[in-house]
Image (cartoon, helix red, strand yellow):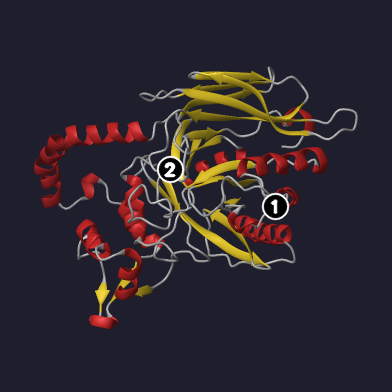
Amino acid sequence: MPTLSRLPKPCHRQLTRGAFLSMAAGLPLLVAAMSLADERVPADASPTWWKGNIHTHTFWSDGNDFPEMVAEWYRIRDYHFLALTDHNVLAQGIRWMPEKRILERGGAAVIENYLTRFGSAWVERRGEGDTAEVRLKPFDEFRALVEERGRFLMIPAEEISDAVNGKPVHINASNIAEALQPVGGQTVSEAIQNNLRAVREQAEKSGRAILAHLNHPNFGYAVTPEDLAHATLEQHFEVFNGHPSVNQLGNDEKPSIELLWDIANVIRLADLNAAPLFGVATDDTHDYHTQPGDKQSARPGRGWVMVRATHLTPEKIIHSLQDGDFYASSGVTLRSVHFDLKTRRLDIEIEPTPNATFSTRFIGSLAGVDGGEPRIGEELAQAEGLSASYTLRGDELYVRAVVTSSEPPHDPIWEGQQQQAWTQPVGWELKTGVE
């Protein structure tokens, strides 16, 4: 790089006169830009809450909109991060999709809406009539169009869609480098373990932080509590999924997702000396073009995670999820969640919303007495209002909290559904020594 004194004289005069004046005139804009950058990425960042969805679909598999349009839906609604999780594919390479199939799946206006938002300079089309096609943009191409530092982040991801004897076994992998194909197994638990090993191998090989979580265990009632408990490589699963076909509440013979969570965690802690499962909430969106009220559609905005991290980067988000430093929500926002190992106290502060009241239930499972069976998923305490706390007595295998609002979600799935938030199980560290 030449020094200033070695620059050709014409350039030297231009820099010292016109360029200097131009630089001076631009200083207020530069200072404003620096201030904005400092606001989004402070030098000494403290943990903050980031809102995100880690399960949704696009035209790359069985969703009904373009990935950029899906990202826009979340970005303009104040989400901070999004993982597009199409089935057994990572959005890579060249792919063209027939316009006829696009319109059949997404509706008559789906291409026009795409053009209106991103313009003909971005939308690539070829052919006419029955041969007309639209190019699906790959992840590395469209992410630059929608990401914003400190505001919105895209995470490369995939839904690994496997099956065992007709039972669906689906695992999402977030922050992957390459697509992973399902590897199967003789049993559901074995298939879960095998796919998780493949995820772990990629993480180790690529040096990336990758989060794997089991999707919708009650979809087809494919995954039992015992399956989930014994797949000990699994550490995360969906305690809430916004798709209307995943049997969230169970039935007369099968447990609800929440009870399944408690049963699996008791088996892990009481029998296997394994860490419990953490619960995430997701949309599992496939349909972006129907209106609230259609309870058969899998629409966006029904479930998300709130992750506490210092920075909005894939690694920071994934590490906090892996550490359990997050909560799941279908509408309730928490100001804080804190568990003190020394005092054995769980404290929760709730963000108020107009016209809503809140009830917090502390759910736990108790160790069996004198060789007796554990008591699973019992309500140990309840509190009303914007703050709640629970101090462990000593016989709990773990405790978690469910905060329920008096208000329904903006887009309910079942009659009588209310907004909720689920914290992660705590207290188990005191007994197991498992980290």
With 357 as the anchor, is 250 left or right in this view? right
SS at mark 2?
Answer: loop
> As displayed, is residue 29 above or below residue 394?
below
Nearest the viewer among 84 and 17 is 84
The residue indicated by pointer 1 is: 224
Q: CA distance from mark 2 to mark 1?
A: 26 Å
Q: Residue at label 2?
A: 412
On the rendered structure, is 40 left or right of 155? left
Q: Secondary structure at mark 1?
A: loop
Residue type at mark 1 is: Thr
> Quarter of the image holding residue 23?
top left
Give residue 191's position: percent from left, percent from top.
Answer: 69, 62
User: In which quadrant of the rendered view does residue 398 lie?
Assistant: top right
Is residue 350 in sight in this rendering?
Answer: yes
Q: Residues within 10 Å of mark 1 (few under 14, many from 20)?
A: some
Which of the pair 104/144 is nearer the observer? 104
The image shows residue 156 at horizontal and vertical percentages of 47, 56
